[in-house]
Amino acid sequence: MGGDRVMNTRPDKDAVKNGKAKKTGVVAGLILLGVLLVALPPFMNPYGESMITQILIFSVFAMGLNIVVGYTGLFSMGHAAFFGVAGYTAGIMMVHYGIESFWIIAPASIVLATLFAALFGIISLRVSGLYFLFVTLALGELLHSVAWKWRSMTGGADGLTGIPYPSLGLPFIMNATHFYYLVLIIFVVCVGLLYRIVKSPFGSALQGIREDEHRMRHLGYNTWMYKYLAFIIAGFFSGISGMLFASFANVMAPEHLGVHTATLAVLMIILGSDRVFFGPIIGAAIVLFLQYYASTFAPERWPLILGAVFVLSVMFLRGGISAHLIKLWNKMGSHHASTKT
Amino acid sequence: MQALKLEGLSKNFGGLEVLKDISFSLEVGEHAAVIGPNGAGKTTLFNVISGALSASSGKLEMFGRNITNASTHHRIQYGLGRSFQITRLFPDLTILDNILLALHGTKPSRYHMFHKVAAYDGIMEKAEQLLQPLDLWDLRGEKVKAISYGDQRKMEIIMSLASDPKLILLDEPTAGLAIDEVPSFISTVKALSGNTTVLLTSHDMDVVFGLAERVIVLYYGQFIAEGTPEEIQANPKVREIYLGIEESEGHAES
Amino acid sequence: MAELVIHILNGISYGMILFLLASGLSFIIGVMGILNLTHGSLYMIGAYVGLTLAGMGGNFWLAALAGGVITAVIGLILERTFFRFLYKQINEQVLLTLGFVYIFSNLALWVWGPFPKIASAPTYLAHSIAIGSFSFPVYRFALIVIGLIIGAGMWWFQERTKIGAIVRAGMDDKEMTMGLGINYGIIASSTLCLGAFLGGLAGFLGAPILGAQSDMGFPILLLTLVVIVVGGEGSVEGALVGALLVGIIDAFGRAFFPDLAMFTVYAILIAFLLVKPSGLFGRR
């Protein structure tokens, strides 16, 4: 029957051993990374610690957004709106109303961001493809204008400054290192949640919709509902990272709601790889490092560099860096197993 | 209660009438085929039945339920299944992922966000049951875009059967299969439970004669004739449509 | 009463600029399937280039043409070097064109500096006439006339010429049109050039009333997109009606609710999305 099937159906022993070796390698690597993340920072200089904190915060943003972009295939350019809503809410609560408790600020800002996502999702999903993109863009810019105009609340173009760290109710005052650990814990929890979602029937369905929405409907899936839920879930994680960002950066500005921040997040996804679970984390690291170096050596030209990175990554890095790294990784294993026909 | 009932179903695109006033019904467990030359509207008919297109007028009932305005995914939940003439699978996902999606589709588990997709009682067994007979179980870790076209066609059929639909639409199911694979396809369909209603379209007369108890003939979107395969074969109007010139020269071939 | 007329005229003249932009972009999207976010940048480049040329003592209208031609050439280069590898890959197109938006606006900042440039209309059009107790710039009338002429020309091209028919057919089904043996590639590239030309032209013609600034690309792009959503993709009449509608509503918004500025535009967008996403004259 299958003259077209040349590959052997029983995996050869070498490949199995290789697969197991690689798996232990990955797990060991993750454990090592985890240990480093926990143990190092108090000993790092403040810039390094700050950089890692920022990478963790944006990783949550990018990975959450990837649920919509990479897994569902919907190009949203407006999720910075929810990042910003949460950030401003947290900032306003702390600066204008003197609320300090993390346990009030976090839920409030995240819930508000998620509600906005629920609203914007309904509007955006009225159209698809290019127009979906435009609309998400426009809605983000709408909030951008709101932040710009509402000086009394948001500080207008100058932004909302002086945003402190929230208080956890612990007996000491929060400093940068404590905040780092808070971010780390939240990061780990978020990654865990995202991993479960992605491996679940729901996560699988999102990918099915990306591949062939028509077919998914013919398998019984209410595809609109999935797209809507994915949009909201991404909004939820955008909100978490926005809330953390407000305290990290000390300031929230209108641009955090608009297209510039949205495209930064998208670039992180594309550079890191939208088809690999951890891709956006790597993308976040790369983009933030680039931003840091650009601001040190050529701050005026950062948008130019950013634009060039976009163009180059689209033309030459199709699939993102992580995808290429994984291909390399797989190739390394296959040098041991020979192809037997 | 009939499995499927079409009453005066029509479909126009702008000024173009693709389906004109189609009416017929299928009893539960019946195997029927829709045939007609290219352009007769067979795929459009399937699209209207599955909800991919909405009917311009007329009524559609499935198992006693009026589905004329129901969305596609609801029709699937009510027991419909459909395979496509041009393979529609999920290329970047593995065979296993594809079949699991098909299996979860009609169950509440499809909305679960915190269980692993394969960690459901009996689901892997069901997947194996579906894939093994067609030698696809061992390939389950391969991405669909990497398997042969013939294997993809087989996947196409299995995917539509995975949810145990009560009414299944098979659109040119043997297109792309090798000649020697057709008999095994026919026996797969015959092996479906007696309550499964099958409606298929095919250009392959072996398939039509092998599977259909009743044949419905469409021509330019109009219902021309229906009957057993033998009756249709002998029907002069049908012969004229298919054979055209030969018939008018007076040669009657069996 | 006179005030009303002023606002309407303001809206219409502004709408004409939007019309030039929107019709160009709409055809580029419809014909080439390319989501060209750099359209706003082309507008900006057209404005700056035209201004520089006019500033060098050139004739206003020649400078306008030159601005348009240069943006057409840029558009062609972009298409040949980058876009043609990305047919149907919407996400990649978005990222690519977004990258160019950043590149162009930063380059413009580098070359022309951060302060907005004000342009002046040609002297014979630089005065105002009285409408009621208000004065209204004659230049804006000129814009309305130009817009109508170009609009009529495009409509004639779309509906009455063979090439226009081919373009429309291609929008509906590119593969089929190619299968008919028509060299769609050349037509597509020409449409892109025409679209880019219109964008640059709009930039320069709009400069006397809107100025030129390195970061103006994005806001004008958003407005253009609203026009396309309202008017519907791929039709000249849609772009015209949509642009006039958006222009007039924006003018009234600025006049009566100055604090809300862009919100009226966003409100239109959201209203249309919720009620009629395909736009007034949409092909789909």
Image (cartoon, coloured by chain):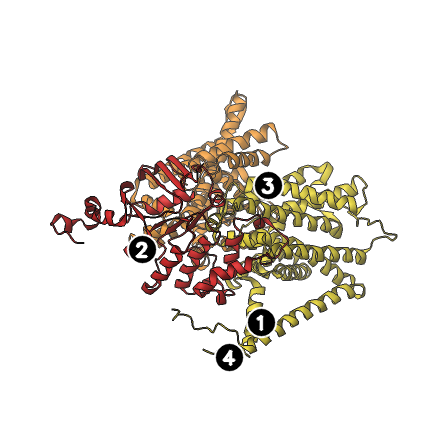
Between discs 4 and 3, the one toward the N terminus: 3
* Chain A display color: yellow
Residue corresponding to mark 3: A120
Q: How many marks?
A: 4
Q: Where is residue C31 in the image (x, y as percent from the top left)?
A: 40, 48
Mark 1 secondary-structure assignment: helix
Horizontal and vertical percent position of residue A93: 77, 41
Instruction: Tell me where residue A175 sits by quadrant.
Output: bottom right
Q: How crowded is mark 1: few (under 14 residues within 10 Å), some or many (20 or more)?
A: few
* Residue A338, disc: 4
3D distance between C-alphas at marks 4 and 3: 53 Å
- Horizontally, residue A104 falls left or right of residue C35, namely right
Disc 1 designates what residue? Answer: A329
> Residue at (39%, 55%) from the top-left corner?
B189
Q: Nearer the viewer, residue A259 or C55?
A: A259
Which chain letter goes with mark 1?
A: A
Query: Disc 1 or 4, which lies upstream in sequence?
Result: 1
Depth check, mark 2 against mark 3: the one in front is 2
Nearer-N-terminus badge (3/1): 3
Q: Residue A121 placed where, x, y %?
A: 58, 42
Say which residue appears at 49% left-offset and 65% top-offset.
B137
Of badges 1 and 4, the one in the foreground is 4
Question: Label 2 is found on which chain of the structure?
Answer: B
- Describe the element under mark 4 as helix, strand or loop: loop
Closer to us: B26 or C97: B26
Which of the chains is orange? Answer: C
Circle 2 residue: B210
Callout 2: SS = helix
